[in-house]
Amino acid sequence: MKLTFWGAAQQVTGSMHLLEVGHYKILIDCGLDYEKETYQEDNQQFPFDPASINLVILTHAHIDHSGNLPTLVRLGFDGQVLCTPPTADLTSILLFDSVELFLRKQSRKPRTKRGNFSGPKPLYLHKHVMDTIDRFVTIAFHKPFKITGDISLTFIPVGHLLGAAAAVLTINDDGEEKKIAFSGDIGREHYPVLVKPEPIPEVDYFVCEATYGGRYHTKDQTLEERLVKEIEEACIKTPGRLIIPAFSIGRTQSLVFALNQIFTKKLLPPIQIFVDSPMAIHATDVYRKHHNLVNQEAKDFYKTMGDEFEFEHLAYVQTMKESKDVSNYFDPCIIISSAGMLEGGRIQDHLYYNIQNYYCTILFIGYCAKGTLGYKLLSGAPIVRIKDREMMVYATIRQTDLLSGHGDHDDLMRTVKQTGQPKKVFLVHGEDKSLKSLSAALQEDGFEVVAPERGEVFEI
């Protein structure tokens, strides 16, 4: 049995791991690597023949785990993609949105003499997304699924996103049973809407994300307290606007529920809230569809107060005209818009009109990969480029980790320890500092740990 790390190896994005059991090849996740400005070109090439892959297992819908699936299909993969039902629904939304983003980037460049767009060619088109969706086969949590006579798969809920799962594979390798688990992205306890991560059973090998290795989430303040403080400062003490970049899928739903609780308790006077993301509207419908998979707090709220994602003074923005009207709304307000790292979506319009506004606060609530506009703002860049224009940053830039969907160092340590004493723990999906911190802590506790390089192969 052979395991090769082709993505999220000593970096965060582009999750992609290849497990070979004899001649049977399983790809675990197939995400976009977008840590370089040339990511579209870089993601065109796979380090293996896509047609040789027999099966893909998708841990969750986020684009750094799912976003290159249509390219894999376009280049010859014709097998199944196994995932949970919410992951199938949410991934479909994200992949169609990716096509629109590719097309917009292509059209921004001047046309050639022949009238063609000169921007980067899309990685894939709508047809390839539809072909990919046709390959989805959904599996419920905790239901063992027989892949072959020698391989079975079980999905374990890990929070992080609706439908997010750790993939646990039980394999008969020449008469010897081996278990290997892939964590996907590990969530947090007490997170709005989402269930807490369940323990992963004891395994022989464990591939674990390390995004927050060596880092700890804020413990001395609740999410409710922090949001109330930010809203008071941005919208009440000073009559300005609070812009919250949030991923349309996952983060927006948790944020809206948290705001619903705040205003239901009357902790703040009414303030207009705009959710400016058509994709968030579709994703919220998926959350309603799979309401049986939200946490007990959200279920209880629904029973007593109604829909967690609807309340007075909350408006979902559909059309571009409505979005422009939001830009012209001059009363204090909260604008929630995608994408979380500011690399696309309507958030760029809101930034364009507000980045030089002294009465605007931009509150980041999630991770921003290196090279992204969000990362540059969080790094204190005094000038940023938005819509091909260099702009001074006058808005207040704030950040909180209380809505981060990733478990912190303690959560990751607990997750690894629950797997027993694996023969080897592979750390992926983390920056160098995080990988080293988590690796050192695990080794101190007696685990054999390695942070693979891209393309590194292990016989297991």
Image (spheres, helix red, strand yellow):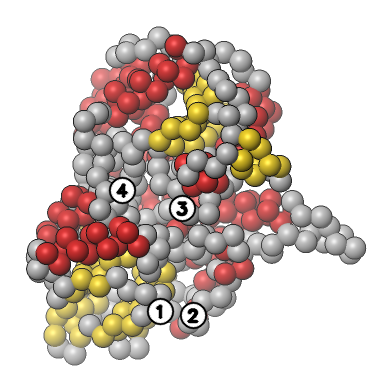
Q: Amino acid at mark 4?
A: His
Q: Which residue in the structure is indicated by mark 4?
A: 406
Per the rendering, the mark at residue 47 is 2
What residue appears at the point 27 percent right and 63 percent down from the top-left corner?
Answer: 436
Q: Which of the two discs, 2 and 1, sits closer to the camera?
A: 1
Proximity of marks 3 and 1: CB atoms separated by less than 8 Å:
no
Say which element carries label 2.
Answer: loop
Proximity of marks 2 and 1: CB atoms separated by less than 8 Å:
yes
Quarter in which the N terminus is drawn? bottom left
Q: Which residue in the structure is indicated by mark 3?
A: 369
Where residue 128 appears, x then y in whole percent?
A: 59, 64
Q: Amino acid at mark 2?
A: Pro
Where residue 199 appears, x then y in whole percent?
A: 15, 55
Where 447 sits versus 86, above or below?
below
Q: How far apart in space, not on screen, are marks 1 and 4 (Cα)?
A: 25 Å
What residue appears at the point 51 percent right and 76 percent down from the top-left corner?
Answer: 46
The residue lying toward the viewer, choosing from 218 and 135, is: 218
Say which element carries label 4.
Answer: loop
Q: Amino acid at mark 3?
A: Ala
Q: How far apart in space, not on screen, are marks 3 and 4 (Cα)?
A: 14 Å
Q: How far apart in space, not on screen, are marks 2 and 3 (Cα)?
A: 23 Å
Where residue 358 appears, x then y in whole percent?
A: 57, 23
Q: How far apart in space, not on screen, are marks 4 and 2 (Cα)?
A: 29 Å
Tell me which label, 1 or 4, sits earlier in the chain: 4
Where 267 sits versus 291, above or below?
above
The answer to whether residue 401 is visible is yes
Q: Which of the two discs, 2 and 3, sits closer to the camera?
A: 3
Where residue 137 appears, x then y in whole percent?
A: 39, 63
Tell me which label, 3 or 1, sits earlier in the chain: 3
Tell me which label, 3 or 4, sits earlier in the chain: 3
Q: Which of the two discs, 3 and 4, sits closer to the camera?
A: 3
